[in-house]
Image: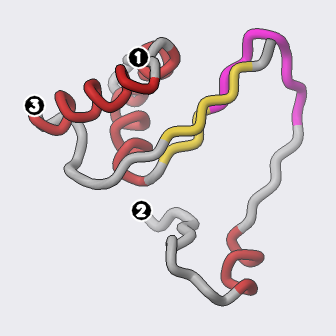
Amino acid sequence: TNPALLGSCDTNAQVIVDHVRLAMGPVAEGDDFFVCTDALAAWFLSRAEEGGRPWETLRDLADVGFAQWASEARRTGGLRNDDVTLVHLDIW
């Protein structure tokens, strides 16, 4: 309920430094990493907790497809009406 958040208008570098988290572990071909802003992350985590596979939905979207998908998800109530940003890293 209290995730580490970085505001888009933070000007205090120490706030940013204090919130940076590092993780280490093996990465293999075929791994995917999804970095999402809060509304999209909430959608992603909700779907995963329900037993869904949200990474499959996001992995296959093109740039235009993502915008159309987000609009539809907002319209149907699955995605909170907020800005969304997605960074997808596909290891190959």
Q: What residue type is labelled 3?
A: Thr
Q: Is residue 36 magenta?
A: no
Report the side of 71 relative to 10 (left or right): left
Check if mark 1's residue and mark 2's residue have beta carbons within 8 Å: no
Q: Which amino acid does label 2 sit on?
A: Thr
Task: Please give the range of residues in magenta.
Answer: 25-33
Q: Which residue is drawn at 51% across and 79% down?
A: 9
Callout 1 secondary element: helix
Picture quadrant where residue 69 is located: top left
Q: What residue type is labelled 1?
A: Thr
Residue 36 placed where, x, y %?
50, 44
Query: Magenta stretch mostly in which secondary structure?
Result: loop
Q: Earlier in the sequence, mark 3 or mark 1?
A: 1
Q: How far apart are marks 3 and 1 (CA)?
A: 16 Å
Which residue in the protein does label 3 denote?
A: 76
Q: Residue at x 56, y 70 (%)?
A: 6
Q: Nearer the viewer, mark 2 or mark 3?
A: 3
Q: Is residue 29 above or below residue 25?
A: above
Callout 3 secondary element: loop
Q: Residue 57 carries which label?
A: 1
Q: Which of marks 2 and 3 is nearer the N terminus?
A: 2
